[in-house]
Amino acid sequence: MTSPNPADLVGQQPAQPATSPQVSDDPSRRRISGATRQQGFFLAVIVAMFLAAMPFLPQFHNGQYLMIQLSSYAAILIMALGQTFVVIQVGFDLSTGAMQGFMGGLVFVLVGWQVPDGLVILAGLGAALAVGVLVHGLLIAKAKINFFIVTLASFTILPSLLRVLLNGSSKPVFSPTLDAMANGSIAGIRTPVIIGAVVFGAMWVLLNRTVFGRNVYAVGSNPEAARLAGVNVDRVAMICYGICALCAGIAGLLLVGSLGAADPSAGLGNEFFALTAVLLGGTRFSGGAGTLFGTLLGLIFLIVLSNILLLSGLPQFWIGAVQGVVLLVAVGIDRARRDA
C-alpha cells in the first residue's frame, strides 16, 4: 500500500475510484456532520429561550427593538468573524477591542486634518490591516513569539496611543459617511446589519470556498503535516491575523460612527464578548475546527441571554459577570470536546 498523500490535508484530494469505500469515513465529512448536529441543537436552544421569554418581555414582540439589537451587535459580529479565522488556525487575538477603539482616535485625527471620508475609511482599514499582518503576523509567524504575548502587548499599547491622540478625553467626530454607515437604513434594514451580512458572506466564501480556507483548517489541524503538503504555514497565520485586525477596524469605524465621538475607553472588553461567541459556536481552541455560522449562533445566544437578563431587571454590572461565566463554560465545553 502507498502512504497517504499529505495533499489531502489541504483539500487537494488525489484521484480515487468513484466507488472508493473511504469516502464515507472521511474525517472532514464526520467533522462537518458533527458540527451540523451541534449547531442544530444550539439553534433549538436559542429559539426555546426566545419563545420562553416572549410572554414576560413585551420588547421581544417589537420588530423595531429587535432590529436595533441586531444593529447594536453588528460590530461585535464582525469582530467575532475575524477572530474565528485566528482560532481555527490555533491562536487568538486579545487586541481586537483595543483596535476597535483605536480606530476612533485615528478617525478623529484624520477628520481634523480635513481628509475626505473615503480616504479616512481606507486609511483606517489600511492601518488595521498593517497591524494585523506586519506586527502580529510577523512577530507570531516569523519571530515565533507566543500569540498571547504579542496580542496582549497590543491590548495595552493601542489604548495608550488612543489616549495620546485624544489627549485623554472624549472628542466629537463629525463624519457624514460614518454616520450613515452606523445609523442609516436601507429598505427598513439598518446599515450596520447590512454591513455585517456582507462581511459574513465574504468571510464565509473565503473560509469555505477557497484554497486559503482549506489551508486554514489544515494548519489548525496539523501545522507540520500542512507544511509537508506544501502549505505556507507562516503566510496563512499572517493572513489570518490580518483578517482579524481588518474586521476589528471595520467594527471600529461602525463604533465611532455610532457614537459620533472618539472615546479613550471605547471597544475595551468587546474582544472577550466576541471570543465567547466564537467558542460557544463550536470553534476549538485547539484549532482545526469551527464555522462562521456557529460563531453567529454563539453571538445570537449571547444577545438573547443579555437581553433577557437586562429586561428582567438584573443590574448591568451583573450581566458582565454572567458573560464571564458563559466564557468559562464555553472553554470547558471546548476542553470536553478535545478529551472526548
Image: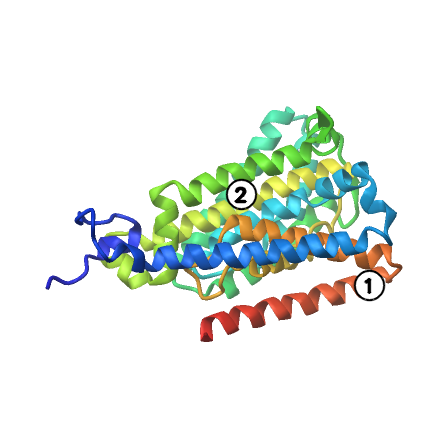
Name, please, the residue furthest toward the right: 313
Closer to the camera, 90 or 322?
322
Closer to the camera, 29 or 337?
29
The picture quadrant where one finds residue 310 is bottom right
For residue 225, side relative to residue 309 (left or right): left
Residue that label 1 marks: 317
Judged by depth in the image, the label closer to the viewer, 2 or 1, is 1
Q: Residue 116: which disc?
A: none
Q: Can residue 93 be seen in this view?
A: no
Spot occupied by residue 33 in the image (x, y as percentages of width and height): 43, 56
Q: In which quarter of the image is the N terminus?
A: bottom left
Q: Can residue 306 be seen in this view?
A: yes
Q: Quadrant of the C terminus?
A: bottom left
Q: Which residue is drawn at 59% across and 37% down?
A: 197
For residue 246, side relative to residue 64 (left or right): left
Spot occupied by residue 16 in the image (x, y as percentages of width and height): 18, 49
Residue that label 2 marks: 246
C-alpha gap between disc 2 and disc 1: 30 Å
